[in-house]
């Protein structure tokens, strides 16, 4: 078995790891997109609620104003927590991108080694064939009489 063929399982493992890292990175991107969407929805809801409060605060009784403010404070806390979730998801995506990059570099390196080995093997085959042809050409020819 040639050296390039013996390296094929290594290349398959490296390619598999790269594909797994790419899938993981895609999942992390989807998670980040979802966290951002949730933050945007929460911000929009909070902004709408705050606008309603400002528009109707004059006609509210003290208890309602207090409850409204408490609810807005909870919405702000929820938005802050969601912003932290977005940041954690962004960091996870960055780590995943780094993992994928490392796997891709490794896979590319293994494939380049295999390519180099295949070139060397082809060159060796050509040299061997040329040597065989030279040897055959040097043999004395028999004449049948």
Image: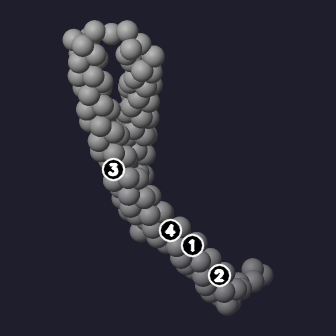
Q: Secondary structure at mark 4?
A: helix
Label 3: which residue?
91
Q: Secondary structure at mark 2?
A: helix
Label 2: which residue?
130
Q: Which tag, 1 or 2, sits closer to the chain's start?
A: 1
**Residue 61: % across, % down:** 28, 9
- Marks 4 and 1: which is nearer the front? 4
76 vs 11: above or below: above
- Labels 1 and 2 touching (C-beta < 8 A): no
What separation in Å lies between label 4 and label 1 (alpha carbons)? 11 Å
* Badge 3 density bin: few <14, some 14–19, many ≥20, Cα 10 Å: some
Q: Which tag, 1 or 3, sits closer to the chain's start?
A: 3
Label 4: which residue?
112
Q: Nearer the viewer, residue 5 or 14?
A: 14
Instruction: Say left or right for 137 vs 64.
Output: right
Q: Which quadrant would residue 124 be assigned to in this image? A: bottom right
What separation in Å lies between label 1 and label 3 (alpha carbons)? 42 Å
Q: Which tag, 3 or 2, sits closer to the chain's start?
A: 3
Give the residue drawn at x 43%, y 25%.
Answer: 47
Give the residue drawn at x 23%, y 22%.
Answer: 70
Q: Determine if residue 32 is in view.
A: yes
What separation in Å lies between label 4 and label 2 (alpha carbons)? 27 Å
**Residue 108: % across, % down:** 48, 63
């Amino acid at each position: 078995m040639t050296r390039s063929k013996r390296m094929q399982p290594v290349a398959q493992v490296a390619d598999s790891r790269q594909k797994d890292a790419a899938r993981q990175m895609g999942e992390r991107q989807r998670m980040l997109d979802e966290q951002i969407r949730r933050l945007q929805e929460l911000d929009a809801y909070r902004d709408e609620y705050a606008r309603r409060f400002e528009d109707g605060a004059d006609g509210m009784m003290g208890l309602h104003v207090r409850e409204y403010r408490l609810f807005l404070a909870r919405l702000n806390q929820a938005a802050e927590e969601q912003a932290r979730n977005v940041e954690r998801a962004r960091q996870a995506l960055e780590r995943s991108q780094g993992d994928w990059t490392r796997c891709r570099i490794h896979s590319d390196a293994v494939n380049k080694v295999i390519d180099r080995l295949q070139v060397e093997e082809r060159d060796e085959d050509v040299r061997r064939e040329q040597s065989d042809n030279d040897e055959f050409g040097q043999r004395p020819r028999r004449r049948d009489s």
